[in-house]
Structure formats: structure tokens, C-alpha cells
Image: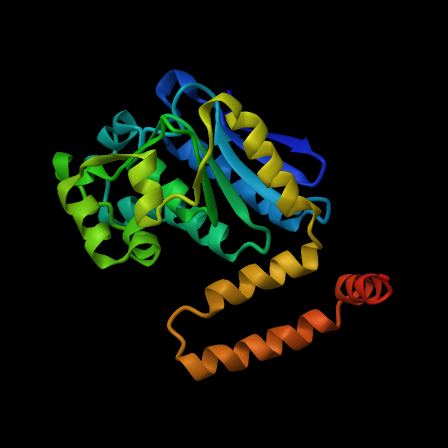
Amino acid sequence: MTRVRVERDGAVARIILARPEQKNALDRQMVDELQSALREAADSDAVNVVALTADGEDFCAGADLKALAAMLDATPAEHYEDAMALGSVFVTMREMPKPVVGIVRGRALAGGAGLATACDIVLAHPNAEFGYPEVRVGFVPAMVMTMLRRAVGEKHAFDLVASGRRIGAAEAEHIGLVSRVLPADEFDAAAATALQEIARAPSSAVQLTKRLFYALDGRGFADGIELGARTNVEARSTEAFRTGVRKFANRD
């Protein structure tokens, strides 16, 4: 049985975690299917934006602990290969040209919180709950820290990973882990509207924006301005820009 389902709504590709009976816990099959779905969406000219969402009441409760228990006697090389399967998903989400929008309701914990953190935008239901509780079972939220400390800063990030505490949607938005908390009574409609707003924008502009946004990591101020100028020139050469400028220039 498949663990991940893909649905299309115009230029929006919905990648759906589809293991609700296990709170969408991540086992190797789900991770591999998720990687495949992301790569397919990245390569599709018909897709402008990817929505990562889930069946059931929870987004994702983290790693499948039964699957991890079955690997206790594996070699370090086998453990590394298994860890990097999920790590490669995070890299794909960051490097793919299309924006990835997390649609989160219910619990997003451990690896599930990692998936949310890896998204470019996170739209949360008021009942959403986020946490990195790995330390409480002797584990480490290791790969997610690369993304988390960028998203919320060192003090908030270390508090979350060292304490393992859970936070609600409002606090997650306050510290920058969540982009927006949408009203509960219109959550699905509001999320769909947000996705369509991104999907309707010229794909060349959105993709250049995502590429530049992450390329600015670690650059100095002047270097960032210079890279921005080069991207500005690249954007001016696109047909979408030329069409848009002509349209506005010809308005009365």
C-alpha cells in the first residue's frame, strides 16, 4: 500500500502523507515515496507550487519507532544511509525550483516537524502543534537543526531541541516557524486561496525568487546586493517580465 498520494489542482501539486492510521509516521517506504513525488513535481512544467499536506487528524508524528527499533543492530553505514534518505528529502525541498508550502493541522513532531520546517512556507491550522522531542528518547533532532536555527534563530531553536517541548500554532508563528495561522472555520479554503495566489504568479519570477532567497545564505551585504542585481537582470530577460511591464506601461 502506498504511503504518499499525489493530486493535481491546476498548477498546484498536492503531495499527501497517506498513513493516517499511524499518524503519518515516517518509515523508509514513505520517505522514498515522498522523495519520488517531490522530484516528479520539481521536473513537471505543469506544476508551479507544491503543497505538502496529510490525511487524518495529524500532519506527521515523526519517525516510525518500530522501524527504528528493527534497525538497532544495523551497522553505522546502514544507519547513515537510512538517515540520509530523509536528509535528502530536506535537500530536495530546499533545492527544487518550485516553492513548497506545508499545510499543517494537528501534530507535527520530530521528523514531522522537520518536514514542516523544510517547507518554504508553512500555513497552520490553529490546532497545529510542533515539537522536536527526540532528546526525550535519547535521540537528537540532528538534521532539522540546520533549517530550524535559520528559521527561528539560535535561542528559540536551542530551546526547542534541548527541551523537547511542544508549542502551539500561535507561538510557532510568533517565533517564525510558521508563516501564517489560518482561521479554523475556513482553513481549507484559505489554504487553497494562498496556494492559488502563488500558482498564478509567473513561474519564472517565483523560481528566481526562491533561488535567490536561499543563495543569500552566508553572503555579505555587498555580495548579496550584487547577486540580487544579477538576478534582477536575469528576471528582466524573461517573457513574463516583458509582458507584465508592457501591460502596466500601457495602462491609462
Q: Is 233 positioned to the left or the right of 67 in the image?
A: right
Residue that protrudes farthest toward the front in the picture: 252
In the rendered image, residue 36, in percent from the top left (x then y), is placed at: 55, 41
- State the image quarter where residue 252 is shown: bottom right
Q: Residue at x 51, y 20 (%)?
A: 1
In the rendered image, residue 56, in percent from the top left (x then y), is placed at: 44, 19
Looking at the image, can residue 1 be seen?
A: yes
Q: Residue at x 26, y 25 (%)?
A: 66
Looking at the image, can residue 111 be seen?
A: no
In the rendered image, residue 100, in percent from the top left (x then y), is placed at: 53, 46
**Count of numbered marks:** 0
Of residues 9 and 25, the one drawn nearer to the viewer in this rendering: 9
Q: Residue at x 67, y 77 (%)?
A: 233
Look at the picture and state if 86 lies above or below 150.
Answer: above
Q: Is 18 positioned to the left or the right of 68 in the image?
A: right
Of residues 144 and 196, the one drawn nearer to the viewer in this rendering: 196
How are the colours assigned in the image?
A: rainbow
Q: Residue at x 34, y 35 (%)?
A: 169
Look at the picture and state if 20 lies above or below 4.
Answer: above
Look at the picture and state if 196 lies above or below 240.
Answer: above
Of residues 84 and 91, the one drawn nearer to the viewer in this rendering: 91
In the rendered image, residue 109, in percent from the top left (x then y), is placed at: 30, 34
